[in-house]
Amino acid sequence: MSQLIGVLGPEGTFSEKAAKRFSPGAEIRYFRDFEEVIAAVEEGAVEAGVVPLENSLEGSVGQTLDALLRRKVEISGEINLQVRHCLLGRGEAGGVKVILSHPQALAQCRGYLKRRFPEAELRTTGSTSHAAKLAGEFSEMAAIADAETAERYGLSVIERDVQDSDQNVTRFVVVGREAPAPTGRDKTSLALYLERAEPGALWEVLGEFAKRRINLTRIESRPSKRALGDYYFFIDLEGHATDPPVAEALARIRERAAVTKVLGSYPRTD
């Protein structure tokens, strides 16, 4: 029986593409945003969800981070997908007056849009495929989306590779309800909240990893939404949460941090 995976819809999103790469025979169910995908996993409506976590050009996806922090789910895998955007539409480039896409896609093509369509109106949509669906209604509209989406919505590829860098990669994560077993080549993602912003507090927490020679591959802050200057810290590190050095570090950190949430330990792709 095929796995049921939730992704951002409608048909043709990069999330769907990542999900099919992860599980080629999966049954896909579409949702309106990343929060809904992760909520569906928590509630058991789908077995897993595939959502974007970060992009090499535009950084982390805030909605995904916020949902992972609130929901009782586990990151169980990751997929790195090279993203190649195209300008799709019914007409020619010279007739384009409105360009639609997901905010992340528009941001990844910011330079191109400013250079080629300085007068065009930019409108955000819930997904790249939703943009393509809307662009099919009017010849003066175009969408930034995947080339494969064009045929699905009766559009032509007006221009290819319109992203601002050829090194445009989005890291998607697979979200489930159970943590996978250690493989010996794992990554752990966690969120920390230091309630008292004492001098050196973050340095002391990070030192627990350094003294055990645990390699950190990503660290960033995100507003807690409680007060200005108040942050959560999101960290990726090499190793599984059950590996003795990582488990020891986490135990020590829990003594110092107000919140220490392991978002998941999963096989790494790099």
Image (cartoon, grey):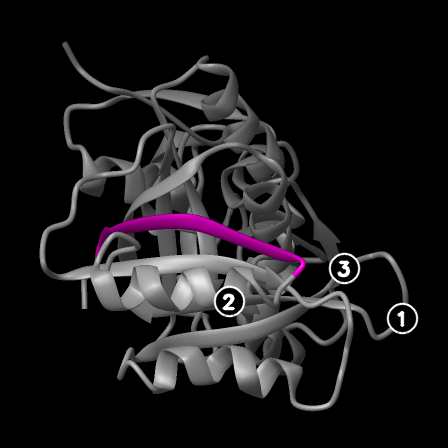
Query: Separation of disc 2 and disc 3 at Cα?
Result: 19 Å
Q: Is residue 29 magenta?
A: no
The residue depicted at 22 percent of the width and 62 percent of the height is: 244
The answer to whether any part of residue 239 appears in the image is: no
- Which numbered disc covers residue 228? 1
The residue depicted at 45 percent of the width and 70 percent of the height is: 162
Q: Nearer the viewer, mark 2 or mark 1?
A: 2
* Local secondary structure at mark 3: loop
Q: Main secondary structure of the magenta part?
A: strand
Q: Identify the image quadrant of the N terminus.
A: top left
Question: In the image, what residue type sits under mark 2?
Answer: Ile
Name the outermost residue toward the right: 227
Q: Residues within 10 Å of mark 2 (few under 14, many from 20)?
A: many
Observer-nearest of 163 and 193: 193
Task: Identify residue for label 2.
Answer: 253
- Residue numbers of the magenta segment: 258-267
- Left or right: where does residue 90 sit relative to residue 270? right
Q: Is residue 16 above or below residue 261?
A: above
Query: Separation of disc 2 and disc 1 at Cα?
Result: 24 Å
Question: In the image, what residue type sits under mark 1?
Answer: Leu
Q: Nearer the viewer, mark 2 or mark 3?
A: 2
Observer-nearest of 35 and 195: 195
Of the two numbered discs 2 and 3 on the same chain, state the one appearing first in sequence: 3
* Local secondary structure at mark 2: helix
